[in-house]
Image (spheres, grey):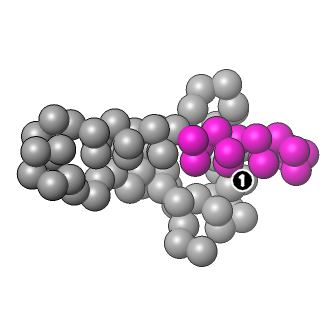
Amino acid sequence: MSDKEELKRALKAFKKRLKLYRRDDESGIGRALSGGKVSGIVGVKPPEGFPPSIWDELVAAGKLRKEPGGNYSLVSE
């Protein structure tokens, strides 16, 4: 069992990584010329630095959903 602060840090790191991947996907030159487009990225691999048990706990808590290929996505709130 991990403490609440560690779970909170892991979830924050995951959200930041997802946000960066989405921004990167949306910032392509082709997208800028065509008027922009919303990213289709919904899941990413979790950041390193946290044990796999953290991600399992966040899935069990209903914060994340495990996707194929070792990716995770945010659960709609």
Q: Give the residue at x 69% y 32%.
A: 51
Using the rendered image of the protein, determine whether residue 38 is visible from the camera's viewpoint. yes
Magenta: main secondary structure: helix
Which of the pair 77/22 is nearer the observer? 22
Using the rendered image of the protein, determine whether residue 68 is visible from the camera's viewpoint. no
Q: Give the residue at x 60% y 74%.
A: 77
| 53 sits left or right of 20 in the view | right
| 33 sits left or right of 47 in the view | left
Q: Which residues are magenta?
A: 1-16
Horizontal and vertical percent for residue 67?
A: 42, 54
Query: Which amino acid, by three-letter code, is at mark 1?
Result: Glu
Horizontal and vertical percent for residue 62?
A: 65, 67
Horizontal and vertical percent for residue 47?
A: 57, 32
Which of the pair 52/8 is nearer the observer? 8
Q: Give the residue at x 28% y 45%.
A: 26
Q: Is residue 37 magenta?
A: no
In the rendered image, the residue lying farthest to the bottom is 77
Q: Quadrant of residue 33?
A: top left
Q: Give the residue at x 9% y 51%.
A: 34
In the rendered image, the residue lying farthest to the top is 49
Within 10 Å of disc 1 (Cα), the crowding (few <14, some 14-19, many 20+) is some
Q: Quadrant of residue 14?
A: top right
Is residue 19 positioned above or below 52 on the image?
below
| 16 sits left or right of 1 in the view | left
**Circle 1: element type:** helix
Q: Quickly name the residue at label 1.
A: 57
Is residue 76 positioned above or below 67 on the image?
below
| 30 sits left or right of 12 in the view | left
